[in-house]
Image (cartoon, helix red, strand yellow):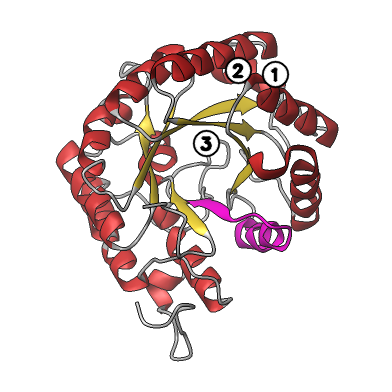
Amino acid sequence: MNHKNNVDILISEVGPRDGLQSVSTTMPTALKLKWLTALADAGLREIEVGSFVSPKLLPQMADAAELVAHLRQRPDVFVTALVPNLKGAEAAFNAGVQKITMPISVSEPHSLANIRKTHQQVYDEVRAVLALRNERFPHVEVESGLSTVFGCTIQGEVPEDDVLRMALTMVELGVDEVGLADTVGYANPAQVRRVFTRLRNEIGAKAGSAHFHNTRGQGLANVVAALDVGVTTIDASQGGIGGCPYAPGASGNIVTEDLVYLLESMGLRTGVDIDRLVAARQWLVEGLPGEPLYGFIPDAGVGKNFHYAGGAQ
């Protein structure tokens, strides 16, 4: 089945990757498997299970291949992973992922600090990954996830023209999709509308997902701005875990539970059951003791006037 059928907005759950790689605790694999099952049972159609990186660098991600194998048993879930380079891509392809996302910093100082690569070196890496995909794994999608799109803690302002140039370069290299990420939580709704509108005008159907952090409380406002200009895939993390290495004490990714409520309340079908989604938090509580979890809906509930966009779940 097409994982985007029968929903208006696809929620891509990134907690198992962006969330877990941002916390120091390594969640036991057995609990991760139960968590992934619970997320799938709640109706999430796309889940980013982890990063294919050196286990010495990120021991939290050492079991990524096992998680892919587990979730590939679910035909109702589209399994994705983050990969920074050719070695990671080959491991992800062999593990059976259906899509990989390559993080591409629009800010070159951020790229050098984050992966120690210049833009030219990044382009070479993307070329190598696409050559491997085209030769041996033609059915796997490759997304460029542009980071520091709305600002950078190292460079400061990131010109929108730089974002568009990078997106066009990625399309010319042959990626299937280009997503935009507010890596450090700088974005505002006016900026989001403007940049996504320009992206769609430049690359059309290859304009992909929106990835927002709630570092400064703008996350859901930015979601609404993205919806206004036609974005149909939104990343989120259960409990809002992860995604905020530069703002201690602040929440990171937007909260999946709150995002589902927002979208369904607006009449947009997500296919996600909020009660089952909230119940899935138990595995995070057990696997990450003491780690703060965020979200208004888990505490307040949905309210007596709430209705799912597509009727009863």
Left or right, 89 with respect to 94, comes to right
Query: In the figure, residue 114 lies in which quadrant?
Result: top right
In the rendered view, would you say 267 is above or below 173? Answer: below
The amino acid sitting under disc 3 is: Pro
**Mark 3 sits on what residue?**
245
Q: Residue 223 lies in magenta, yes or no?
A: yes
For this orientation, the residue located farthest to the bottom is: 304
Rendered residue at 24%/57% (across/down): 38
**Mark 2 sits on what residue?**
113
Left or right, 101 with respect to 266, comes to left
Gap between marks 2 and 3, in whole Å? Answer: 14 Å
The amino acid sitting under disc 2 is: Ala
Is residue 181 at all visible to an observer of this figure?
no
Task: Mark 2 and mark 3 in contact? Answer it, CB < 8 Å.
Answer: no
Which quadrant of the figure contains the C terminus?
bottom left
Gap between marks 2 and 1, in whole Å? Answer: 6 Å
Q: Nearer the viewer, residue 4 or 47?
A: 4
